[in-house]
Image (cartoon, grey):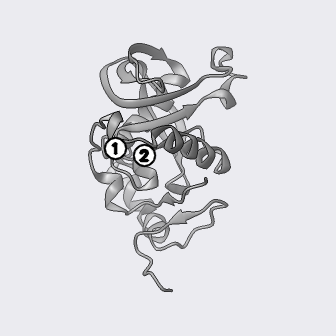
Amino acid sequence: MKLPIVAYGDPVLKRVALDIEPAAFPDLKQLIADMYETMYAARGVGLAAPQIGQSIRLFVIDATPFEDDEPDLKGFKKVFINAHMLEETGETWPFNEGCLSIPDIREDIYRNKNIRISYLDEGLQQQEESFKGMAARIIQHEYDHVDGKLFTDHISPLRKRLIQKKLTDISKGIVKADYKMKFPAVKKGR
């Protein structure tokens, strides 16, 4: 089932999400399936639970669209449950990032080339892995969501002031997105 994506300005996007006890989520497999369906329908490469209004440490990624640039990303699809970043290393490098919660805005964001992260996989097995390049970047972007951060938190204060009207418009629903969204500043019943 496609879920509405929460837009910029919703408080859930700024909260540090909580670890989940998988047994307390009997429909976890369905939630993961719904997140993938939502992400694909919006043509994204990652989606975090806060973006669908749930403040839990869960995100999904599929980096396959970047396989032309990095062949190792062919079929690179993963679920991260209760993820915790252990290390971010290497030179930082820029990439023009966007976000499904912030449609029509893209900014060059600098991130570390390498990461090491611990998480539960879709089978609820504990993992600790290292990632590099675009895989690391996508994971860092989604990880930021479960830590209550947005990619706009990584830009300069001046740049943020320059896009503030666009951000405010997004929260009011004044944006074109070809996927279902939930806007925090739009009153119900309108």
Name the residue at 52% across, 20% down.
133
Crowding near pointer 2: few (<14 within 10 Å), some, many (20+)? many
Q: Picture quarter containing residue 184?
A: bottom left
- Tell me whether circle 1 and circle 2 mark residues in contact (CB < 8 Å): yes
Looking at the image, which is closer to me, 33 or 179? Answer: 33
Element type where label 1 sits in the image? loop
For disc 2, the marked residue is: 49
Q: Amino acid at mark 1?
A: Ile
Q: In the rendered image, which quarter is residue 19 located in?
A: top left
Point out which mark residue 56 bears.
Answer: 1
Horizontally, residue 54 falls left or right of residue 2, namely: left
Q: Nearer the viewer, residue 138 or 61?
A: 61
Q: From the viewer's perspective, is 72 left or right of 189?
A: right
Residue 131: x, y in percent?
Answer: 47, 16
Mark 1, Cα crowd under 10 Å, few <14 / some 14-19 / many 20+, is many
User: Could you tell me which residue is drawn at 46 percent across and 61 percent down?
Assistant: 7
Residue 185 in picture, x, y percent from top left: 40, 74
| Callout 2 amino acid | Ala
**Looking at the image, is 41 positioned above or below residue 171?**
above
Please count the marks in the image: 2
Marks 1/2: CA–CA distance: 6 Å
Q: In this orientation, which residue lies closer to the viewer: 122 or 131?
A: 122
At 38% from the left and 45% from the top, the residue drawn is: 155
In the rendered structure, which disc, 1 or 2, sits on the residue that comes first in sequence? Answer: 2
Expressed as whole percent of the image width and height from the top left, the position of residue 47 reads 51, 43
In the displayed image of the protein, which residue is found farthest to the bottom?
A: 190
